[in-house]
Amino acid sequence: MLDLKELNLQAFEKIEVILEALEIEFEDFDDNIYCKCPIHEGSDNDRGFSISREKSMWKCWTRGCEQGLGNTIFGLVRGVLTKRNGDEATFSDALRFICSTLELGNSGPKKKVSKEPSEFSKVVKIFNRQTDTSPPTQRVDELKYETPSLYFMSRGFSAKTLEHFGVGDYYNKGSDMNQRAIIPIYDSSSNLVSYMGRAIRDYIKPKFLFTKGFDKRYFLYNHNNALEKSQQTSCMFITEGQGEVWRLHESGVENVVGIFGKSITKQQRAQLLKTGITRLVILTDNDQAGRESKMKIQRELSRDFTLFFPRFNKKDIGEMSTKQIEEMILPQVEGMY
């Protein structure tokens, strides 16, 4: 049964059909295809863009256009459609174009009626099955509190950052969230689904408390803010918690989410698959547990995404200054944020 990786391979096997449908002139040399880059403006090098059938990937040798889109067939088609139409093409636009061009979907020319499901419907079915872990609907009573959080400001985060993420301190003796720094959590559609309260005093237990009924397995922290940039770059940065998200945000990285722990759940994986991105930058903590987490993520997600593991010499991203992140992390992930 066809999945997205198999569709990518199949599309590269019939790459001439895709290129002709995109009205791209090219030269065919056995395993490789060469042409002017069809994505960026001002391309005049006839061999500045290459496609490898064997590796099922493409590369722009002059401006590195694949760094922002991903070197899959979906990134290529997205880039060309965006340039051609003037509007930002989505993963869904690319998928629809590919399936239509290869006559895998219902939008292709009708041939004889078959009771067998079309290849496009198989892709959609698998895609829906992979994402059939929809977050539970939950109503949350809104808390009234002042931002920014003085507690997190004392931990080195800027007032501007904490205001951006709606983080403040809450005092209400009649509430379980009393004397906690409050972090609102939203789903991918910006619906408030929970609050996370971080104890301000050491004697308050537990250290972290979520709104009653919240199931963190289904959600990614900052998903709503990260989604647009992630789809533009076909890349998502993965951190353990909210502090790392804030620190990367201060360093100019918008496409970053937190997984509320050290491992990505199957429900979170489904949320990532639904975005259509192809690359993940993994930034779990640099301790033994974090290294084990990286190995687990590599085993479980390497078939679905291209994974990147930037090196850094601090315990976690939250301990790093923006200058350290800009000097140590960002040069390793150019074009991904």
Image: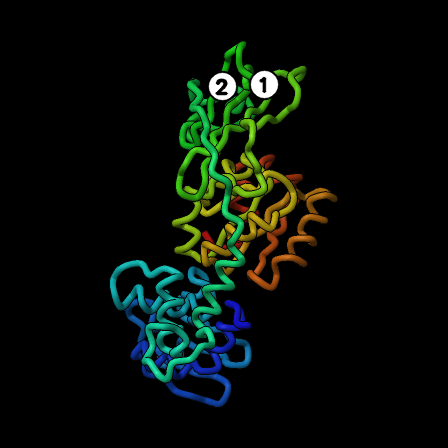
Q: Residue furthest top?
A: 173
Residue 243 appears anywhere in the view: no
**In the image, is residue 119 above or below residue 256?**
below
Residue tagged 2: 169
Q: Could you say which is closer to the camera, residue 128 or residue 184?
A: 128
Q: Could you say which is closer to the camera, residue 225 or residue 150?
A: 225
Residue 159 in picture, x, y percent from top left: 44, 25
Q: Quadrant of the N terminus?
A: bottom right
Crowd class of label 1 (few under 14; some 14 to 19; many from 20; radius 10 Å): some
Contact between marks 1 and 2 (CB within 8 A): the answer is: yes
Q: Earlier in the sequence, mark 1 or mark 2?
A: 2
Residue 104 in picture, x, y percent from top left: 41, 76
Q: Residue furthest right?
A: 288
**How many angstroms separate mark 1 from mark 2 (CA)?**
8 Å
Residue 83 in picture, x, y percent from top left: 29, 66
Q: Residue at x 48, y 58 (%)?
A: 128
Q: Amino acid at mark 2?
A: Asp
